[in-house]
Amino acid sequence: MLFTAGMGIGLVYFGVAEPVAHFTTPPTGEGGTPAAAREAMNLTYFHWLLHPWAVYIVLGLALGYAAYRKDLPMRPAAIFYPLIGDRIHGAIGHTIDVIAVFGTIFGLATSLGFGASQIGAGLESLFGVDNTVVLQMALIAGITGIAVVSLMLGIDKGIRRLAEINLWLAVGVAAFVFVAGPTVFILTSLPSNLGYYLQNLLNTSLNMFSFSESGTAWQAEWTLFYWAWWISWSPFVGMFIARISRGRTIRQFVAGVLFAPVGASAVWFSVFGATALRQMLAGDAGGLADAPPENALFVLLDSLPGPDVLTTLFAAVAILVVVLFFATSSDSGSLVVDILTNGGDPQPVWQQRLFWAVTEGAVAAVLLYAGTATGEDPLTALQTASLASGLPFCVILLVMCYALVRALRQDPLFADAHAAGPVARSEAAVAE
């Protein structure tokens, strides 16, 4: 559920497209070289590994602590209880929750738009259907229906089972690319890419491209969009992982949320991204350089060696993976918005669940249509909405960090542990 609800659609959409984009058009320097390929994987890791999940941990940990340790309602405003007390139930608290709702809806709409465009591209690749905005809106409507059914069944019977099925299908597609693609190169590139990313993490994080106009434009198009997207998603993903993590210690929560999805994402991008870059460096890309982002995965699958029927089969499985990622993101997002708009009640009425599931699909469809009406890329309106909703919540997250630290320092267990001295603290840690 962490993997599928957190960023499933984005991983499938950008798994091939982003490394290829950074390779062909890097922020600085010459594209299409081995050095550009190494930097492309570094930038992709930078956008998808530690940074987004660290953002999710802040809200998820703070919310889980407030709800399960302090018996406060499961809503972002509750995190600020150490700072504003009972005013979390007034205008200030309601404002925080409303901003979180808007961030969740528009952040999720961006993901649904990416998913619909990629499903349409897959259908166009397999069956020759034109990937138009009308088709994408129809896909949003149909898959929202699947999400509604999953949402009505609840977390254990609906969302969890759908997530498990989808994860195995995604692993199957990745395994096919791993076996049919440059297997040895993937195995050697994974530690190399990860090592380069970790070695340059501080420099990559603080690089503002002050002396490069092309780098500044690239950063606005990619990094700033991602940061706003992750922040707008943080109420949704943070609340969802808090909802499914009751009974975990803080150490278990941080380790599980940070390292499990990050490790899976690193493997995913090395399998798909490194395979695409290897083919491009070898001059056997099969049109990857010119493929739109939503088509990149299917172009890669079609270029792999093997019987046509096998590549067609896994292209169909990839479409199903995106469909189920779409559904799991929608149903888990609807559950979160449902809880937010119901005062933190984790068991809202089914009519409200239905309303928010349909509303999220409608917002994604409207934004797609709005992007087309302005003559721009249909996804531009979705990305703009994500930026607009994510930036205000950034301020809330910064204050939230302070509120969490203050709450932890006020906890009786914290005071007892520090009063007992280092030996007693070590014994308590061993006992835990």
Image (cartoon, rainbow, N blue to C red):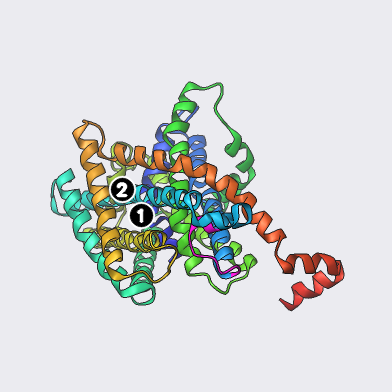
Specify whether 428 is left or right of 184: right
62, 223: nearer the viewer:
62
Quarter of the image for residue 384 reads top left
* N-term mark: 1 or 2: 1
Q: Residues within 10 Å of mark 1 (few under 14, many from 20)?
A: many
Specify whether 312 is left or right of 261: left
Residue span colored magenta: 69-78
Question: Looking at the figure, which quarter contains the C terminus?
Answer: bottom right
**Residue ID at (44%, 43%):** 390
Residue 108 appearing in the image: yes
Q: Which mark is residue 9?
A: 1
**Residue ID at (76%, 75%):** 430
Residue 303 appearing in the image: no
Q: Position of residue 426 (x, y in %)?
A: 81, 71
Q: Position of residue 32 (x, y in %)?
A: 43, 33
Mark 1 in CB contact with mark 2 (< 8 angstroms): yes
Amino acid at pointer 2: Phe
* Residue picked out by circle 2: 114
